[in-house]
Amino acid sequence: MEEKVKEVIDELRPFLMNDGGNIELIKIENGIVYVAFQGACAGCALRDMTLTEGIERTIKERVPEIKEVRLVN
């Protein structure tokens, strides 16, 4: 499961990097993925929308075992 999540994050990373940001996988625990935004994404006003509408939705589509994606500060 972790490898699948890493693959999805690696596919999404270039989109974040285009805007000066990045994403780091912190851990996966009980079907919940914990990530941290870096660079421009860390302070972006749209980070919550990016998290839920982009990252979480894509991860859950490709890795159905995942229940939620949470942002770690």
Image: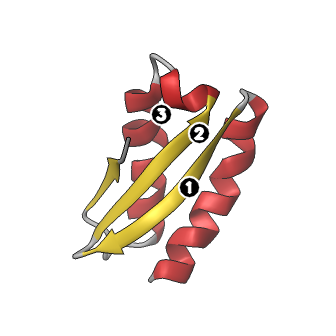
Q: Position of residue 13 (x, y in %)?
A: 68, 49
Q: Answer few, some or many: residues within 10 Å of disc 1's Cα (few below 14, many 20 plus, some between 14 and 19).
A: some
Q: Answer few, some or many: residues within 10 Å of disc 3's Cα (few below 14, many 20 plus, some between 14 and 19).
A: some
Identify which residue is drawn at 47% across, 48% down.
36
* SS under mark 1: strand
Q: Position of residue 23 (x, y in %)?
A: 58, 48
Q: Is residue 13 above or below residue 16?
A: below
Q: Is residue 66 left or right of residue 49?
A: left
Residue with the mark numbered 1:
24
Mark linked to residue 36: none
Q: Amino acid at mark 3?
A: Thr
Q: Is residue 52 left or right of residue 10?
A: left
Identify which residue is drawn at 45% across, 61% down.
59
* SS under mark 3: helix
Identify which residue is drawn at 58% across, 70% down.
6
Residue furthest toward the top? 45
Q: Amino acid at mark 1?
A: Glu
Q: Specify which label sits upstream in the sequence, 2 or 3.
A: 2
* SS under mark 2: strand
Identify which residue is drawn at 40% across, 69% down.
27
Q: Is residue 41 above or below residue 57?
A: above
Q: Are marks 1 and 2 in contact (CB under 8 Å)?
A: yes
**Mark-to-mark CA distance, 1 and 2:** 7 Å
Q: Nearer the viewer, mark 1 or mark 3?
A: 1
Residue with the mark numbered 3:
50
Residue with the mark numbered 2:
38
Q: Position of residue 72 (x, y in %)?
A: 36, 47
Q: Position of residue 53 (x, y in %)?
A: 41, 38
Quadrant of the rendering where the C terminus is positioned: top left
